Image (cartoon, rainbow, N blue to C red):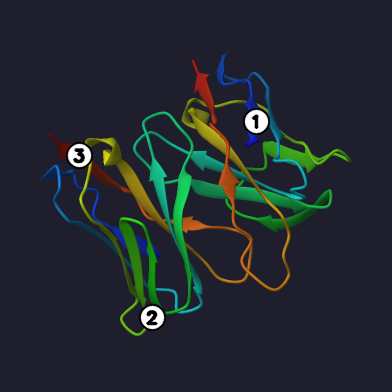
Amino acid sequence: QKEVEQDPGPLSVPEGAIVSLNCTYSNSAFQYFMWYRQYSRKGPELLMYTYSSGNKEDGRFTAQVDKSSKYISLFIRDSQPSDSATYLCAMSDRTDKLIFGTGTRLQVFP
Amino acid sequence: AAGVIQSPRHLIKEKRETATLKCYPIPRHDTVYWYQQGPGQDPQFLISFYEKMQSDKGSIPDRFSAQQFSDYHSELNMSSLELGDSALYFCASSPRQESSYNEQFFGPGTRLTVL
């Protein structure tokens, strides 16, 4: 079983919809939780970073972490066609390496 | 803003050949990370360096080696290439901050194809 589980999708939504992306994990040592966006054949781009439990909002994006349930979420409000990409959750304990989920492919259609 | 630079962007090699991938971190970033992303897979951590010393090691094959130089750029050397080494290789860099998470910024990747 992978340390980080993420539904690969694809997830297809109409423009303007609220998108919910989720990951679960098994390693209770994880303290840092990230969401990356990756366009085809490009490097991952950091969207949101959260330390420990709680919510964090940045524009149309909200990240939630529930350490008691080992569950993290990313919400995208007023989704746009330009949001179409693969969204990867990633986690870390106090070491350098990131453990990624498999990524969820999102398509926002006009 | 300056980003992580990787070269070459594309590389085609034959089985059993060697390959060298280069990474130039963002200015003033002293930590470099290497990841391998196979087709349809998530990035897997290979190795990281801080101040020219290896700081962490992941699932890097013995056929691979890496180092960080005095100007902080890093090179990933891959020998006896196998078909399964075909992947996208990402380099990321971060400034070292002892009191908080080291936010990693990724480069565009080098696509290695082994024939």
Say if A58 sits above or below A17 in the image. below
Rendered image: mark on residue A107: 3
Q: Are marks 3 and 2 in contact (CB under 8 Å)?
A: no
Same chain shared by disc 3 and disc 2: yes
Q: Residue at x 49, y 32 (%)?
A: B88
**Looking at numbered disc 2 in the image, what kind of residue is underneath it?**
Lys
> How far apart in space, not on screen, are marks 1 and 2 (Cα)?
35 Å
Q: Is residue A108 visible?
A: yes
Q: Residue at x 62, y 36 (%)?
A: B3
Of A27 and A58, nearer the camera is A58
Of B33 and B86, nearer the camera is B33
The answer to whether B108 appears left or right of B71 in the picture is left
**Looking at numbered disc 1 in the image, what kind of residue is underneath it?**
Ile
Residue A55 image point, x, y percent: 37, 74
Q: What residue does disc 1 label?
A: B5
Q: Residue at x 38, y 80 (%)?
A: A67
**Looking at numbered disc 3 in the image, what kind of residue is underneath it?**
Gln
